[in-house]
Each structure stands twice: as structure tokens, then as C-alpha cells.
Image: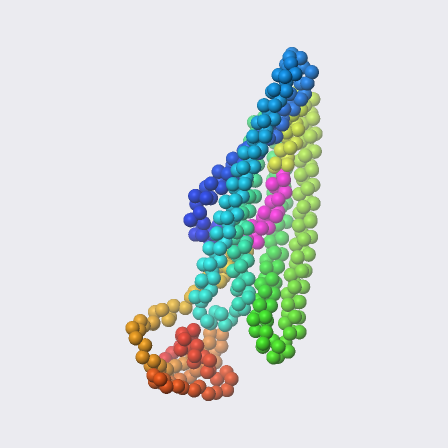
């Protein structure tokens, strides 16, 4: 089974220029966003706490002039961060949609090229569900990578690097809770992935059964089979709902555990920061800044469970799509096909035998007959005797077993 990213690599090559632009937009957006709390710290330490210091600010105009500069820089940083964030979002959404559509169209064409023996043994609705879910999940997977994974990793790296540069003691406290946070998240989301797989299977069965019933509603009505179809759909919905409740409970446990670790991190930052503040090793502004940084570090990690679950759901959709793509189109007709310049209308079956793949019983045994141009031939027989099979062989929906 090809890994999800390797599988997708063939579909995003045409978007490499736009993807490079997205990388740049993410880094610039996060960089300007990081300037905002930094400027707040400078405003707090260098100005707001110096109110009334006549040696530092001889006049009111000088004081407000320097404060105004900081505020204008703050506004400019927020404007640039929002601008690059919008650029990132625009290109991520449009590129993700194009990649998802490419995956769908490739898979759709592949399914149409598969032999009739494949289509006879699967539910069309179930296959279509695999294709549409893969399209949606591939687009989501791409968006999650840039809007969540890469963006958060870059932001955490910036924050951690700056914190260690300002005060390595606080840097250790800030990142010290990350390993248990990530480990706990990985363990719980592994369980969520298993539940999600069961939900996907139940939904595919529900989709397949429902579409088949609606598509062949004449048969359902003819055999008074509506109650049976409803019971089958109810069974699949019960399985899906039961697993949905299990998944919801697992998410709540995950959120509670993550919130507890985040609170411990924030309390530790404030507690140790207060000690360093008393010793004169930390400014009041830096203490506020490092407390803000806990949100920069742990809020992205808080989303890790949802990110991992979406990644696993997308990976599972791609894996299930690959089970369809591994089916090889029938190429016997292509190998034995003859280019006919002019059709005369001669048709001949010569000692044709045929057996369906899923049935060892011979449907046709040593069938031979000619059909001359302009003539008609009637095939008469009981239901299941092979009349439709003859026509399917003529149209090369199937290849003869022999003859």
C-alpha cells in the first residue's frame, strides 16, 4: 500500500509554484503574528510601566510620540499578518480542491475502465462513496497540512527559539510539557482512528445499499422488498451511530487530558516566572509574553488530536481508494481487437464457452451460430439460460472463456 503523501505526489506536481507560495505565506504570516505580542511586551516594559518617569520622558508629547510609534508598528504587523494569512488561505483552498478533483477524475476513469466482472460483484453506490470521500478527504488532508501541521510546527519553532533566546530557564519550562502532551495525544488518537475506520465501513455499506435500492426501485417494489431495504439501512445506521458515540467519548477524554496538561504548563510558567521576576532575572512584560506563548505552543498542540484524526481519516480514505485502483482494467479486448475499416454486419459465435468469475458453472457451453447481414436471430430460453450473456459477449463487456 502506497503511503498517502507518496500517493498524492503525482497529483500536486502541477501546483508546485503555488505550493511554494503557500509555504512563504505561512512563514510570513506567523512571523508578523509573533511581532504583535513582542511589541506588547516592549510597550508594557518600556513605556506603560515608566509612566511618571520624568528622567526618561521629559515631556508628554515625547512619551505619546514613542508610544504611538509602537502602536503603529503593532497595527502594521497585524495588517501584514492578516494579508499573508488570507493569501495562504486562498491558495490552500483552491489548490486543495484541484488536487481532490484530480484524484476523483483519475479514480472515476479507472472505475469505468474496469471489466464488467468487477462491477457485477460490487455495489455502485459503495464504490462511488469511496471516490467522493477520497476526493473530499484528500482536499482536507492538503488543507490540514498547511493550515495546521506546517503552520503550527513553524509557529512553535519560532516561539520556542525566541523563548530560549530570552531566557533558557523559561524555555525549558515552556517546552517541558510537550513530550507528555504529544505522547498522550498519539495514544488516544490511535484509538479514535480505529473507530473512524469502522464508521467509514458502515457509511460505505449504507451508501451502497441505499443507492442500489433507489436505483433499482422497480425491483424493490415488485418484490415488496422496501421493509427489507429499510431494515438493512437501519442496521448500518445503528452501527455508524454506535461508533460515533464511541468516537465522541474518546474525543472528550482526549480534550480533558490535553486541557489538564495545558493548565499545568500555564501555572508552571506563572509560578516560575514570578520567582525569576522577584530575582530581577525577568521583566514583567516578558512574564506576560511567556504566558501568552503558552497559547502559541499548546493551542496548536491542543488541535493535534483533531489534526491526527483528520490525517488518519484522510489516510484511510486513500487506502480504501487504492483498493479500487489496484483493480486492473481488462486488456484482453485491447490485445485481441481488430481494426475494422468497414463493417459488413457478419457476426459469428464459434464454439464459445463462458463462465463468470464468481461462478464455476458454465453459462454458455459450445455455442455456435452465425448472423448474416440484414438478418435477424431470436434467442429463446428460460431466465438464466444465457441470452443476456450472449449480448454482453458480443459487446465485449466480457471475454469468452474459450472459443
Q: Quadrant of residue 275?
A: top right
Q: Secondary structure of the magenta portion, mostly?
A: helix
Q: Position of residue 253 (x, y in %)?
A: 69, 48
Q: Position of residue 351 (x, y in %)?
A: 37, 83
Which is nearer the eye, 368 or 255?
Answer: 368
Q: Quadrant of residue 348?
A: bottom left
Magenta-colored span? 298-315
Q: Is residue 143 above or below residue 112?
A: above
Q: Residue at x 45, y 49 (%)?
A: 12
Which is nearer the eye, 87 or 312?
Answer: 87
Could you tell whether 81 is left or right of 327 in the image?
right
Could you tell whether 317 is left or right of 352 in the image?
right
Q: Residue at x 61, y 30 (%)?
A: 37
Q: Residue at x 66, y 28 (%)?
A: 288
Image quadrant where one finds the C terminus: bottom left
Is residue 232 in the magenta section? no
Amino acid at each position: 500500500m502506497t503511503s498517502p503523501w507518496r500517493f498524492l505526489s503525482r497529483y500536486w506536481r502541477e501546483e508546485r509554484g503555488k505550493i511554494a507560495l503557500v509555504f512563504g505565506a505561512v512563514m510570513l504570516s506567523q512571523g508578523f503574528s509573533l511581532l504583535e505580542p513582542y511589541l506588547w511586551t516592549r510597550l508594557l516594559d518600556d513605556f506603560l510601566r515608566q509612566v511618571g518617569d520624568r528622567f526618561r520622558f521629559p515631556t508628554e508629547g515625547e512619551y505619546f510620540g514613542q508610544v504611538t510609534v509602537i502602536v503603529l508598528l503593532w497595527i502594521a504587523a497585524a495588517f501584514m499578518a492578516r494579508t499573508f494569512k488570507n493569501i495562504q488561505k486562498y491558495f490552500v483552498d483552491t489548490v486543495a480542491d484541484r488536487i481532490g478533483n484530480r484524484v476523483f477524475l483519475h479514480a472515476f476513469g479507472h472505475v469505468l475502465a474496469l471489466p464488467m466482472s468487477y462491477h457485477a460483484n460490487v455495489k455502485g453506490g459503495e464504490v462511488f462513496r469511496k471516490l467522493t470521500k477520497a476526493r473530499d478527504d484528500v482536499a482536507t488532508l492538503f488543507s490540514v497540512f498547511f493550515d495546521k501541521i506546517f503552520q503550527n510546527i513553524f509557529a512553535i519553532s519560532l516561539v520556542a527559539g525566541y523563548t530560549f533566546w530570552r531566557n533558557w530557564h523559561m524555555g525549558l519550562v515552556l517546552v517541558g510539557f510537550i513530550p507528555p502532551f504529544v505522547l498522550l495525544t498519539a495514544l488516544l488518537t490511535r484509538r479514535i482512528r480505529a473507530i473512524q475506520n469502522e464508521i467509514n465501513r458502515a457509511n460505505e455499506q449504507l451508501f451502497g445499499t441505499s443507492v442500489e435500492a433507489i436505483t433499482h426501485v422497480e425491483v424493490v417494489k415488485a418484490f415488496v422488498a422496501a421493509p427489507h431495504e429499510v431494515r438493512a439501512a437501519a442496521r448500518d445506521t445503528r452501527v455508524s451511530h454506535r461508533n460515533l458515540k464511541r468516537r465522541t467519548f474518546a474525543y472528550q477524554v482526549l480534550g480533558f487530558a490535553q486541557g489538564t496538561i495545558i493548565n499545568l504548563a500555564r501555572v508552571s510558567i506563572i509560578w516560575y516566572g514570578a520567582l525569576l521576576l522577584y530575582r530581577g532575572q525577568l521583566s514583567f512584560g516578558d512574564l506576560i509574553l511567556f504566558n501568552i506563548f503558552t497559547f502559541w505552543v499548546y493551542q496548536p498542540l491542543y488541535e493535534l488530536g483533531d489534526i491526527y484524526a483528520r490525517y488518519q481519516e484522510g489516510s484511510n480514505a486513500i487506502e480504501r481508494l487504492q483498493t479500487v485502483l489496484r483493480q486492473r482494467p481488462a486488456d484482453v479486448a485491447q490485445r485481441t481487437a481488430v481494426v475494422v475499416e468497414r463493417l459488413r454486419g457478419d457476426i459469428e459465435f464459434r464454439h464459445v464457452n463462458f463462465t463468470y468469475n464468481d461462478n464455476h458453472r458454465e453459462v454458455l457451453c459450445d455455442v455456435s451460430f452465425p448472423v448474416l447481414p440484414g438478418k435477424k436471430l431470436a434467442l429463446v430460453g428460460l431466465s438464466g439460460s444465457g441470452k443476456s450473456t450472449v449480448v454482453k459477449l458480443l459487446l465485449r463487456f466480457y471475454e469468452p472463456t474459450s472459443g
